[in-house]
Amino acid sequence: MVNETQHTCSASSSSKSDGGSSSGSESSKDSSRCSTPVLDADRHERLREKMRRRQESGDKWFSLEFFPPRTANAAVNLISRFDRMGAGGPLFIDVTWHPAGDPGSDKETSSMIIANTAVNYCGLETILHMTCCNQTKDDITGHLQKAKRLGLKNIMALRGDPVGEEWEEEVDGFNYAVDLVKHIRNEFDDYFDICVAGYPKGHPEAESYEADLRYLKEKVFAGADFIITQLFFRSETFLKFMKDCQAIGITCPIIPGIFPIQGYHSLRQLVKLSKLEVPQEIKDVIEPIKDNDAAIRNFGVEQAVSMCRELLDSGVVHGLHFYTLNREVATTEVLKRLGLWTEDPRRPLPWAVSAHPKRRVEDVRPIFWASRPKSYIYRTQEWDDFPNGRWGNSSSPAFGELKDYYLFYLKSKSPREELLKMWGEELTGEESVFEVFTCYITGEPNKNGHKVTCMPWNDDPLATETNLLKEQLEKVNRRGILTINSQPNINGKPSTDPIVGWGPSGGYVFQKAYLEFFTSSEIVTALLKVLKKYELRVNYHIVNVKGQNITNAPDLQPNAVTWGIFPGREIIQPTVVDPVSFLSWKDEAFALWIEQWAKLYEEESPSRMIIQYIHDNYYLVNLVDNDFPLENCLWQVVDDTFELLN
Amino acid sequence: MVNETQHTCSASSSSKSDGGSSSGSESSKDSSRCSTPVLDADRHERLREKMRRRQESGDKWFSLEFFPPRTANAAVNLISRFDRMGAGGPLFIDVTWHPAGDPGSDKETSSMIIANTAVNYCGLETILHMTCCNQTKDDITGHLQKAKRLGLKNIMALRGDPVGEEWEEEVDGFNYAVDLVKHIRNEFDDYFDICVAGYPKGHPEAESYEADLRYLKEKVFAGADFIITQLFFRSETFLKFMKDCQAIGITCPIIPGIFPIQGYHSLRQLVKLSKLEVPQEIKDVIEPIKDNDAAIRNFGVEQAVSMCRELLDSGVVHGLHFYTLNREVATTEVLKRLGLWTEDPRRPLPWAVSAHPKRRVEDVRPIFWASRPKSYIYRTQEWDDFPNGRWGNSSSPAFGELKDYYLFYLKSKSPREELLKMWGEELTGEESVFEVFTCYITGEPNKNGHKVTCMPWNDDPLATETNLLKEQLEKVNRRGILTINSQPNINGKPSTDPIVGWGPSGGYVFQKAYLEFFTSSEIVTALLKVLKKYELRVNYHIVNVKGQNITNAPDLQPNAVTWGIFPGREIIQPTVVDPVSFLSWKDEAFALWIEQWAKLYEEESPSRMIIQYIHDNYYLVNLVDNDFPLENCLWQVVDDTFELLN
């Protein structure tokens, strides 16, 4: 996107002699230039800069608060919720610190790991809460170091609620949030963006409202970048608080904390915890309907919408922070009614980017993990550099192994019983496997009346783009070409195209047709004969679980299969078919047959043996049609193969 | 180009645990992969590998020998000859070592610098001769180190002719070529490919033909990679020699040295020097026509063609080495008649590649130097890394300054008088400058009847591609938009297109329309108003000699203006408009007004002051139309500008 302001700079570039012949005046080039052309600002700015930019552009925003889940299953669900609510475009999410839940540990349910997942796997700007209670200075430093290592860049510095009735001083620890802010600045300089809490009614333990304001000012002057407030029930409460803050010299952003009332009991519990008083006019409405959950939620949405409108209309509020209580419906409803929920179908790249600072420049990935981006991120998390501009430049091509922890992300969102209904309680032969693949493609129910909405290689229903190929895919799956990944060829569609577009507007996107499938060795033999006719047009890789590998790719070079041309930018080629990575993907793709499908059945059962047979004997094949301006020839290749077999 | 042989490899890629989580089996990926996708083999293989590959493919080749010139002007001419004869596709050229001409020095005429020019600026695979005579071991080591530094990779190791009548032993030096071969292998291991001389009739100083063969074997066993022979007059002389070599165990390639007789005197001189005897049948033909140069040359060509045919028909000769005597006609004629002169219009990249090993991966350059590739290579010679895949990744963006030595390459091939005829003995105003530009574009003679075949920014007539824009260019130059660089937009033409194609076959090439010109500040003011309408479509950079710079380029990012999509490869984008480099180019482009044009005239003369005025007051402008699939809008921009001015 072209910068619309015309900037005149008076830079003389005449090279000056300093004895060396490579002298010149362009030494600042590297620092002044972004190396990733897509959505640079979004991927390079820190949170406080994003906030400032949004405020300057008059663009209102929202953020979402979550708490860590209690069980691993709940964590899987929360991650799905991050993905769904992330689609609405929050500026950031934040994850609370649960002292009782071993918050800095490596458990799937710890605050640290949930925040890590949000940043790295869901690509969300994330704030990790951290409290002083029950922790020594060294504990806290350790947590902060870990957070930094995991790619977290923002901390909400809190004192935290006392564990018992009264606050107990921690030996070698901190007793006030301000001490934690100072500590973070001392130990980590300007690395983290720091958020602190503001209390529109004053902190319940503070001597007075005024004294509490002075504490807040101390926290800000110690290095906090912005303030998120405790919940409140009337807009005037917040607006007065904001005015009072400004009056004593607090100039950083102050973000109102919004709590849509979602139920009688959760309200009572929160009120007890926060020592807030619910205004009489709210009590009057709620008490009569306290047993009607839907009515209370409707009221809560109404009340939140009208309060948020007052805040936004005041002109001084630029963003709204929502206490979601890990629930989706009420908050999403409020945001939609406020017009803040902006489900932008446009993608910066064809795949979901990660928000780890190390991955800022990443703009190329192998196509194989297209439906499993979290697995790709996990398996490459130890890389120091990420491919940028060109895959061939990657210096860290080793993929992480398939470990236990990985299986957490690999886990299907659906329970075993549902999977059995979709994929078959009892398989009678390879054909029943073909049928499962076919039903997944067509969206039709299987013979037991169940729709197949996911597959071991794809947790979600068919992508819109793949739908373009539906008819052909159905035909080939029915005959044992079991497709797990595909894309149509595209010869220069606008980058704003709702289905295949990505990247900044004003550009053009391109694709080479791609088809990836499992199939029997009988079909592979025929396919190889047919491929001879297409030698100069189609690149192929054919591999079995033992690693026998047949390819016509020149010198192990990657083949770019998705690329985009944008105004004033270098070419971006975000997806490649990489022969070397394919061998790592092959391990994962074959393992999914066993881990996700075969293990649904009893050992030695016929169903399990059918899947095991496929795993042991089928080949994984990928095909690229290099002639992207012509009609996709891969269907012809497959048709020719079937014809040869007849 | 797809590798047509199907190779099956049994590589298991299952990642093995070694405690680290980035372990895996792909550690060899980097070494097994080329990072530059275009014509990899040609840019990565060493000479002996190229020779082997050509022999295996049955593809006959030739090479060309030159000696260093005596004067700087002769050097300029020789470099042009390298370019012209390089177009015929020699496998390599070689440059002789002239002990009398300070051969290892930095003089424009030294053997070292001529070989350096051939490799770096003409992109030719080059062998530098080196002799033992009059040099100590340390001298020789110094020369070899320098050769390596300059990117030379091949040495022809010779004893050299005695300076006087008899060979004089050098204290601390070498007396035999075999000692030089051993020295190179000792000091530089396998870095250089080494060539040695063979004497089909035996060396004149050798005790016997057999003894000389034994010396040759010694040289080969000491580490020589191939043999080039002394000239001879009968094919059977060479074929017998080759058989004799093989009989005593010499198995490396032996390349016959071909000397097309070009004149009576040069033949006599050479015969005297090499102590060879001219066969009676040749003497019989030549003596009667010794004063008829054309007749002798015709005979020489006939004789060489028929001898070369016999050699090639023998089946044991794969390449022919030509002693050119720095002349073009006879050798070119012989090569054309043999069918070995292969002027392949296909280019690996849109610009001329350099053969320095450091530049092997280079595949992106700014478009500004499109007509001045040697200047670009000179100004970037100190870079350690060259942009590969993406310009933005370049880590050495500082351009070398415009020094004296550079002016040698910057020098026009035409003498002052010719330039004055083309560019005007006397300028009467800016309009007479417009006329020169217009005549250069149209190819029509100027008002004094002289064609304008070069310009300060372009040593050659208009490129074929630019011809596509001729009509429009003529119109705008006439009105003071003085174009120095341009390209049409291309939306996916085959890579084999004779005009705009480049790279491997089977691909598609693309371009964004580009226009670069000098123009007055009056036109710039109008242009800027017009450009507002095209803000999202056209990127511009407008700069004057003082460095005042007006642009709408986002964040100093480069804009890719030429790219290609090839089977089984990553995207290649060899040309960019880079805002930072543009400021270095601007210095060069403005300097050419003064250095090449203004200085043709007397100081204070009106003609000189006109050029000086343009230099001081005009702007250099470049425009890119980002909407490459649509009709080029840059002409409309210029038309709108003129309309606004009217």
Image (cartoon, coloured by chain):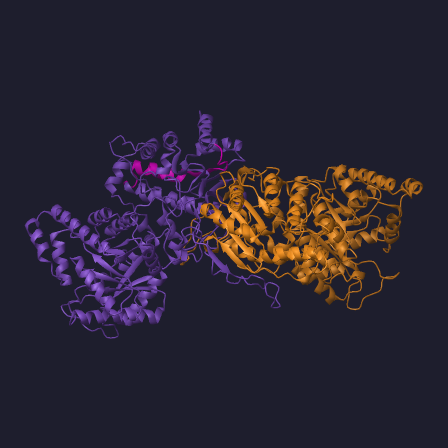
Chain colours: A purple, B orange
Image mark count: 0
Residue for point 78% across, 55% down:
B69
The range drawn in magenta is A601-630
The residue nearer to you, when weighing A318 against B269, is: A318
Quarter of the image holding residue A609?
A: top left
Relative height, residue B92 to residue B337 (above, below): below
Furthest residue toward right: B288
Residue A128 percent coordinates (x, y): 29, 60
The residue nearer to you, when weighing B19 against A358, is: A358
Instruction: Report the side of A483 relative to A175 (left or right).
Output: right
Furthest residue toward top: A646
In the rendered image, is residue A122 in sight? yes
Magenta stretch holds residue A623 = yes
The residue nearer to you, when weighing A572 against B5, is: A572
Residue B478 percent coordinates (x, y): 62, 44
Furthest residue toward front: B646
Residue for point 34% across, 72% down:
A186
Residue B458 percent coordinates (x, y): 65, 49
Quarter of the image holding residue B207?
A: bottom right
